[in-house]
Image (spheres, rainbow, N blue to C red):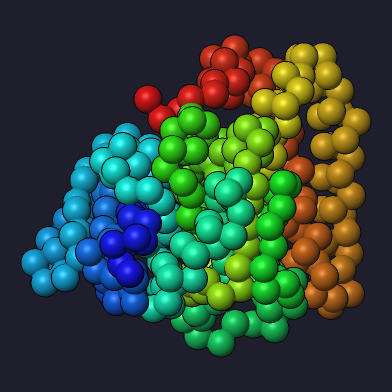
Amino acid sequence: MSENLRTVSIIIPTYNREELLGLTIESCINQTYPKDKFEIIIADNNSTDNTKSVVEEWANKSPVPLKYLFEPRQGAHFARNTAAKQSQSDILYFTDDDMIADKDLLVNIVKVFDLDYNIAVVGGKVLPKWEFNPPEWLEKYFKNGSLSLIEKSEKLIIASYDIGIYSCHQAMLRKVLFECGGFNPDIEKDTLVGNGETGLNIKVLNAGYNFAYTGEAVSYHIIPRSRMTQKYLNKRFSNQANCDSFTTFRKNENSKKSLLKLILYSHIPNFLKYMTGSVLKRISNSDLWRLERVYAHYYLQKIFTDYRFATDRKLREFALKYNYID
């Protein structure tokens, strides 16, 4: 009976994606989950396009409640956390404005929470929806987390460790989100400045909760032409370096001296190794140069980020916060 089902809020942060947002909203409205048991909250993260008009148009014809809120602080973490405050649902389902949900997504993701009393977070498959046929090298090396894609061989996983769940396809108990201080900072415009859902997931695990993955909950990530380029992937790996440095510093609270030693004896040698390797492989016509090049950008960014942690007291204090939701 639907009266016994958990309530769900679908939360979609958005920034200047009016051309894709409607597809995401439509796929969420068309869920087979009972219409009186879920709502959709669009968190407009300071868009300058016609995002608000797109949302209002859908709200006027939606059979499920569709709410609009404006979050002027730039950063998807602000949008997610602010939207979470507006919901009173049992479960919060986070997705992005370039995702298309399978019609049975909510049904399949919500039922997993009932398999184990200690499950706090559930994720599922994220498959690509290519704008056009991707180049061979992209599918060979980057059809994975580099493009926020997830496809595990297991049908179901329940674990007390991080199983790799991204905020583009992540359901979470609302009470746990607030207990664990919300999403850590992540992307501001195109630059990742913190560890976002990675940081939140670490806090959830440290609080003693379990994670789950189900292959039955499927969402599709729209991959446009602009993301099928070496330039985009270089930027993506640079952002990952920011995330990893943030995570490492939160865990170890490295001293200035230890950070400078990391830069000198790890990051710089690795940057030089991968950059040299990418040049040599490109000369020899091996497409492996693309993989070497993204790792060169990763370690180059690690140099800059860890130097900031070594020299910027305010950044160190910001990175050590627990509660980012207030």
Q: Is residue 307 above or below residue 96?
A: above
Q: Residue at x 48, y 55 (%)?
A: 171
Q: Residue at x 49, y 65 (%)?
A: 111
Q: Position of residue 265 (x, y in %)?
A: 91, 31
Q: Is residue 131 above or below residue 3?
A: below
**Residue lying furthest bottom in this view?**
133
Q: Position of residue 169 (x, y in %)?
A: 50, 61
Residue 197 position by quadrant: top right
Q: Residue at x 53, y 58 (%)?
A: 114
Q: Nearer the viewer, residue 33 or 50?
A: 33
Q: Nearer the viewer, residue 139 or 248?
A: 248
Whether residue 185 is visible to the viewer of this picture, yes or no, is: no
Residue 96 position by quadrant: bottom left
Whether residue 267 is visible to the viewer of this picture, yes or no, is: yes
Q: Residue at x 89, y 74 (%)?
A: 284
Q: Position of residue 148 (x, y in %)?
A: 58, 62
